[in-house]
Structure formats: C-alpha cells, structure tokens
Image (cartoon, helix red, strand yellow):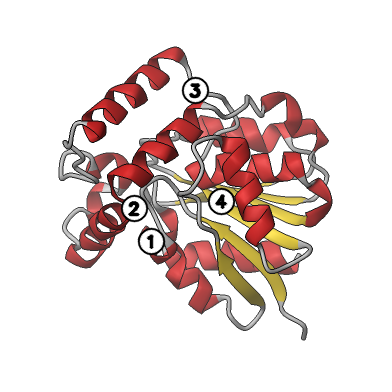
Amino acid sequence: MKKIPLVLVPGLLCNDSLWQSQMSGLRDIADSWVADHTRSATMAGVAADILADAPFKRFALAGMSMGGYIALEIWRQAPERVMRLALLGTSARADTPAQSARRRALIEMASCGRFVGVSTVLLPLLVHPDRMSDPLLVETVKTMARKIGAAGFIRQQQAVMSRADSLPDLTRIACTTLVMCGREDAMTPLDRHEEMAAGIRGAHLEIIERCGHLSPLERPAAVNLAMREWLLG
C-alpha cells in the first residue's frame, strides 16, 4: 500500500518530540514530516514557510494547539494541497484582547532575558493531573521548550497573535476532518472543539479520556488509533 503523506505541525514551545509516537505508530500507513514553525513572526508567514518546505504536493495535515492555528492558515492559503485535516487541542477563534495582552507580557519577559520555557507552574495547564508525576513526560515537555528558546518563543507568540478568526471559514472546509481533544484540556476546553466540529461539515469529534492538552504525548495509543481511522477513512 502506498503510504499517505502526512504533515505534522507542533504546538507552541513544542518540536518534533511531540509527534514521535505518531511517527512511529503510524509509519506503516503514513510518510510523516514534522514542520518547522519557528522562523516567521506572522501566522501567514509560518504557513507559507511550511507550504514551501513540505516535501509533498498534497498531504494529510495535523496540527496541535498553535499547530492547529497554523493548519487552518495552511488550508486557507492552499486548500487544494490539504487532503485531510486534523485539529488537536486547538481553537478556530482569534485571540481576545486579554489573551494578546498576556502574550505581550510574556514576550516582554523573554526579551528581557527572563524566558522560563515551561515551568512547574505551567505544567498543570498542559498535562492531566494523573501525568504530573511522570518524569519522562515532564522532562520531554521542558526539553522541547528549552530547544525552542526565547527567540523562537517570541516569534511564535507574535504569530499566534496575528492569526485570523477562522470561525467564518469552517463551513468551507470540505476535506475529511478530525477534531480531537483531551477531556480535561485546560488550555483549549472541550467546548472550543465542539464548536469546530459543529462548524465543519462531516467532522468527527474524538474526545480522549483522562487527558489534558498535550494528547499526542499523554495518550499516544488513543491518538494513534483516532489518527489511523482518520487517515484510512
């Protein structure tokens, strides 16, 4: 069987480590490539970078958190290249003024040399309480953030603030779409995913139980099963 080209887009302060279990678990059906989403400071620029770099003319596209924002922008720029779409732990909405204000404060901190990556204080927003005592998971999350670094983090936050409101576009998405959410996602709650699934014709909503924001890391088996069905469906 010819493998399905699959572009995977990480979230804020995440890199290819986020998707390692999916790349391994789906390798029998998918030719996976992880995008670099750290070089541009606008959402349009990040999407254009990925479209220029992607080694496939057409591909299935999965994005988590910030990666979901990017995936929607990629679809907006080149819908003819997106065969299937998966949106994990994300939202179709633009930033609120309060969210943008918090991002600007974090950018200021990072610009002044106070970049902390993912601290113990932030971890409860990213992973389910049951996984807080998993040293390998916690260290993976912190290591990804350190590798992105302050400059990459600043560009990512600027890009996230620049993103468009995708809610009006959802009805135009015609490809097979998976919307996936951890039941206890504290960053992007279930209702944001229900909103996307309701807006995209024929979208399937998959809820991962006992899971927080970083579902590909927290519950890789459940995520792999849902993505396998999405890719083959």
Q: Residue furthest top?
A: 97
Question: What amino acid type is highlighted by mark number 1?
Answer: Leu
Residue 73 location in percent, x, y? 66, 39
SS label for mark 1: helix
Marks 4/2: CA distance?
17 Å
Tell whether label 1 touches label 2 (CB within 8 Å): no
SS label for mark 3: loop
SS label for mark 4: strand
Q: Which mark is residue 95?
A: 3
First in sequence, mark 3 or 1: give its number: 3
Marks 2/1: CA distance?
17 Å
Residue at image mark 2? 148
Q: Is residue 57 left or right of residue 228?
A: right
Select label 2 or label 1 by which is in front.
Answer: 2
Position of the N terminus, as image quadrant, is bottom right
Select label 1 or label 4 by which is in front.
Answer: 4
Marks 3/4: CA distance?
18 Å
Residue 203 location in percent, x, y? 72, 45
Q: Is residue 107 left or right of residue 80?
A: left
* Residue 39, placed above or below residue 15: above
Question: What amino acid type is highlighted by mark number 3?
Answer: Asp
